[in-house]
């Protein structure tokens, strides 16, 4: 998933010291977790920020930037010129007034031949102005009034708002002034007049002005930044600096409302774990319903296939002393502390294993009782594999239903809890993935551990294909599951991460990655969800994000944390622009608005992105991670993208021999203006030898083209033929409705593809678990072998198997350089 504006902190550059890409007035941002870990916790004086609407990023001094809230950033983004943007930011009055403007506010529009009177009918973005996948500029749609009617444009007939012809205007914030000051303008003026007597002070409770959740923060300190008052606020172990005008003091009435809300929230709700107040064993029950009976609240609770209604005051919520949550597979039971039961109790829907003639079998109990002519207690099992005898019938009588050959009736005592999901030493039958503060003795890291080699093509069917294969997903972990599976299942391109010498506090994360995730994945083809949760908990404990164990993240955010902040891996990508080199771990493809691509390949997308942004590769990368062009997470730029199984980056290198696209001799000249000329091939930069360049640029329409000379390595001999620099595709991450899956290419043939979904199925309902599935998808090769015209005519919903998801939902492509991956 791509970052959203709620996940980042915005800044405006106010001054620069030798900046490569930013000028005073530039807008930039940094993710909240990076800001908190780098600035708040590590107290670093500078931050690596990314330009809004740009791939450019570099380190900037914090003293050279001023933070913005999202509304301010969106208003300023409408201004294309950095100097103009800085001017209106420093002027402050218009910007602060605009933040509080609402629909139907009467305003004066300035900046035309005469001032115009109107009413705000629309506030938001417009596609007629530059668009960023993170934010878009906020404009104001004005319907002119009175004597000024008819002096506008016909913009009101668009989808922005409706008005009479030539009676609408779409303007940026600095061109309007409220006739009656907005509520924010009033509050700002009042705050200004009361600065001395009513300024927020240390120890007070505040809330964000524009935060609908009304979350409370405690003021830890008050300071000044370039003449603007700032406050240092904290909540839930998070501490940040914000402008004082972004927060408001919490009033007595507000605190009373919070207390009332808190009182209501303390009431037991559906999905919580409880125990009887007077039950010394503290046996756990799950609340499956809450209702009112004669004015008294009652709860419907269940356990071990028993369900009953009791008054709410007869039970108590299970409270754990641990500060971090224990996350059960059933998310509603997240606050329950694992317990040890005196004996194993299995019931209907319990997950079990048992010994069969051909090995251990796994399944779910669907029925418990007595069969005719049998006195002992038996159970009916639904097995994972068709190793049974019926579909749920016994001697012609049906006891439950399941697919044929998956039902088996056995003695209950023959079954035991499924050891794939919890320790055999634990007698508790419920399935828990609680992260333990201390590892079990038999899994504690005690020294070096060799890695298991990645899975080869001839091993895929035996190790990977099937249900309960891959990495088990749990609680929004699909972004991490898909990324780790793609990087480590069938390739060793980033195995260097597993053996770098690290600080002790980072070594535990490396150890978890190697011993608990990569090695089990490669040797057994399966990683339990608790190990992914353990990794997420460790990242949370390192301070990278307070929602790492609960919320969905972006794959690139997770990979950057692992590669840059934890493993301190050398950046995978070194880009050259205007003679300067910048470094990165992933590359976001951006295209200019004038591209003519309809059904692009990855080769074309990368070349067009480099061409439009004036980029080259400073050196050939060992691994290349490409993010597909999107308008945010939800909007794709292309209906289909064709995977390039090989990516030729020869023409993208700053140095190295290139060959004339016409005669094949050493190229000495490059023409960027010929890049989109339909006369030439749709792929590849247009480079020529001197003879061919003269011929190509002899027609009048090409004589004005600006040519640039290519650099050759010193001492290069023209008789030496250097092979092209190519990279191989090894994985693709896809996203649909906020769920990530991955395709992995494990062999040289076009049909050597597998598809992985960490949450493909689920067993056991609320207290059950996700079933990861890996399946072969040779149908992908069929479509890759099609001519582009035939592929373009394929209707996505009619494509075979899972192929549609690869071609239509691609989010990130991963390439490796076979000649370099073992040397970096």
Image (cartoon, grey):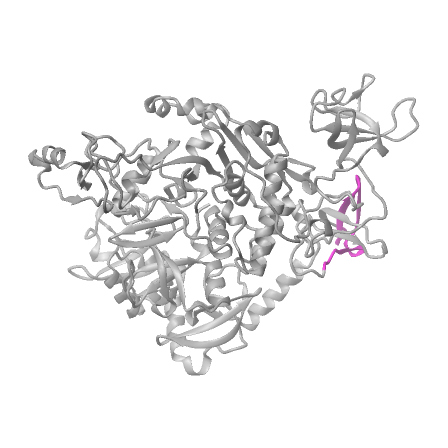
Question: Could you tell whether 393 is left or right of 793 in the image?
Answer: right
Task: Residue 644 in the image: state x and y as whole percent.
Answer: 37, 32
Is residue 700 rendered to the left or right of residue 126?
left
Residue in the image at 60% along x and 55% along y: 508
Where is residue 368? Give x, y as percent.
83, 31
Q: Is 304 contained in the magenta span?
A: yes
Q: Is residue 433 left or right of residue 659?
A: right
- Magenta-drawn segment: 293-320
Nearer to me, 155 or 748: 748
- Say if 526 sits above or below 81 in the image: above
Residue 495: x, y in percent? Answer: 51, 45
Q: Total of numbered circles in the picture?
A: 0
**Residue situated in front as seen by the camera: 493 or 64:** 493
Res. 592 visible in picture? no
* Magenta stretch holds residue 719: no
The majority secondary structure of the magenta stretch comes to strand
Q: Which residue appears at 25% of the width and 45% of the height?
A: 713
Q: Nearer the viewer, residue 189 or 377?
A: 377
Q: Nearer the viewer, residue 434 or 97?
A: 434
Identified at 58% across, 43% down, the residue is 451
The answer to whether residue 408 shows anywhere in this view is yes
Quick check: 522 above or below 101? above
Q: Is residue 18 left or right of residue 528?
A: left
């Amino acid at each position: 998933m791509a970052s959203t504006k709620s996940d980042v902190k915005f800044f405006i550059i106010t001054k620069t010291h030798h900046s490569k890409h930013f000028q005073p007035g530039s807008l930039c941002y940094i993710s909240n977790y990076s800001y908190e870990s780098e600035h708040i916790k590590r107290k670093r004086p500078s931050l690596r920020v990314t330009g809004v609407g740009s791939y450019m990023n570099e380190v900037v001094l914090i003293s050279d930037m001023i933070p913005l809230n999202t509304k301010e950033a969106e208003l300023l983004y409408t201004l294309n010129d950095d100097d103009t943007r800085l001017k209106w930011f420093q002027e402050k009055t218009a910007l602060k007034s605009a933040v509080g403007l609402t629909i139907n506010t009467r305003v004066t529009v300035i900046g035309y031949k005469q001032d115009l009177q109107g009413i705000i009918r629309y506030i938001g973005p417009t596609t007629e102005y530059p668009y960023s996948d993170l934010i878009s500029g906020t404009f104001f749609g004005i319907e002119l009034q009175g004597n000024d009617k008819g002096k506008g444009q016909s913009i009101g007939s668009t989808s922005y708002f409706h008005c009479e012809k030539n009676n609408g205007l779409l303007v940026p914030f600095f061109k309007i002034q409220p006739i009656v000051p907005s509520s924010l303008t009033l509050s700002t003026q009042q705050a200004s007049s009361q600065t001395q007597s009513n300024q927020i002070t240390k120890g007070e409770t505040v809330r964000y002005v524009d935060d609908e959740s009304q979350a409370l923060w405690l003021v830890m300190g008050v300071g000044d930044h370039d003449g603007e008052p700032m406050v240092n606020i904290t909540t839930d172990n998070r501490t940040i600096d914000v402008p004082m005008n972004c927060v408001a003091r919490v009033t007595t009435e507000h605190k009373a409302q919070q207390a009332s809300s808190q009182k209501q929230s303390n009431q037991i709700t559906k999905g919580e774990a409880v125990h009887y107040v007077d039950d010394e064993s503290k046996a756990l029950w799950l609340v499956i319903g809450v209702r009112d009976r004669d004015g008294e609240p009652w709860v419907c609770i269940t356990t071990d296939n028993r369900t009953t209604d009791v008054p709410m005051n007869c039970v108590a919520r299970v409270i754990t002393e641990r500060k971090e949550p224990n996350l059960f597979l059933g998310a509603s039971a997240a606050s329950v502390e694992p317990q040890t039961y005196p004996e194993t109790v299995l019931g209907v829907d319990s997950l079990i294993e048992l010994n069969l003639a051909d090995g251990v079998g796994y399944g779910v109990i669907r029925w418990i009782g007595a069969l005719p002519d049998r006195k002992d207690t038996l159970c009916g099992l639904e097995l994972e594999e068709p190793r049974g005898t019926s579909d749920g019938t016994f001697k012609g009588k049906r006891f439950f239903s399941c697919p044929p050959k998956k039902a088996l009736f056995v003695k209950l005592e023959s079954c035991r809890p499924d050891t794939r999901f919890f320790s055999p030493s634990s007698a508790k039958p419920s399935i828990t993935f609680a992260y333990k503060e201390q590892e079990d003795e038999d899994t504690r890291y005690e020294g070096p551990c060799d890695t298991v080699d990645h899975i080869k093509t001839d091993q895929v069917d035996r190790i990977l294909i099937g249900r309960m294969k891959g990495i088990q997903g749990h609680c929004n972990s699909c972004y991490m599951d898909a990324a780790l599976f793609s990087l480590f299942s069938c390739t060793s391109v980033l195995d260097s991460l597993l053996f770098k010498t690290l600080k002790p506090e980072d070594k535990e994360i490396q150890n978890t990655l190697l011993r608990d995730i990569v090695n089990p994945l490669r040797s057994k083809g399966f990683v339990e969800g608790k190990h992914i949760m353990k990794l997420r908990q460790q990242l949370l404990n390192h301070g990278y994000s307070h929602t790492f164990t609960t919320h969905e993240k972006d794959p690139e955010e997770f990979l950057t944390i692992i590669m840059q902040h934890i493993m301190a891996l050398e950046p995978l990508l070194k880009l050259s622009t205007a003679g300067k080199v910048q470094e990165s771990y992933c590359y976001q493809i951006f295209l200019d608005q004038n591209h003519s691509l309809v059904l692009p390949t990855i080769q074309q997308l990368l070349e067009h992105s480099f061409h439009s942004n004036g980029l080259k590769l400073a050196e050939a990368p060992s691994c290349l991670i490409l993010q597909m062009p999107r308008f945010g997470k939800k909007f794709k730029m292309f209906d289909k993208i064709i995977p390039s199984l090989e990516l030729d980056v020869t023409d993208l290198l700053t140095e190295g021999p290139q060959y004339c696209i016409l005669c094949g001799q050493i190229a000495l000249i490059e023409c960027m203006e010929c890049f989109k000329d339909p006369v030439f091939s749709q792929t590849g930069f247009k480079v020529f030898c001197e003879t061919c360049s003269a011929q190509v640029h002899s027609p009048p329409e090409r004589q004005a083209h600006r040519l640039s000379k290519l650099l050759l390595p010193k001492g290069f001999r023209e008789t030496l033929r250097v092979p092209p620099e190519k990279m191989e595709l090894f994985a693709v991450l896809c996203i649909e409705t906020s769920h990530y899956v991955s395709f992995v290419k494990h062999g040289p043939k076009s049909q050597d593809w597998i598809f992985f979904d960490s949450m493909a199925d689920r067993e056991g309902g609320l207290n059950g678990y996700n079933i990861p599935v890996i399946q072969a998808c040779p149908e992908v090769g069929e479509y890759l072998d099609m001519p582009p015209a035939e592929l373009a005519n394929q209707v996505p919903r009619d494509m075979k198997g899972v192929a549609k998801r690869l071609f239509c939902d691609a989010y990130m492509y991963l390439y490796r350089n076979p000649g370099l991956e073992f040397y970096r």
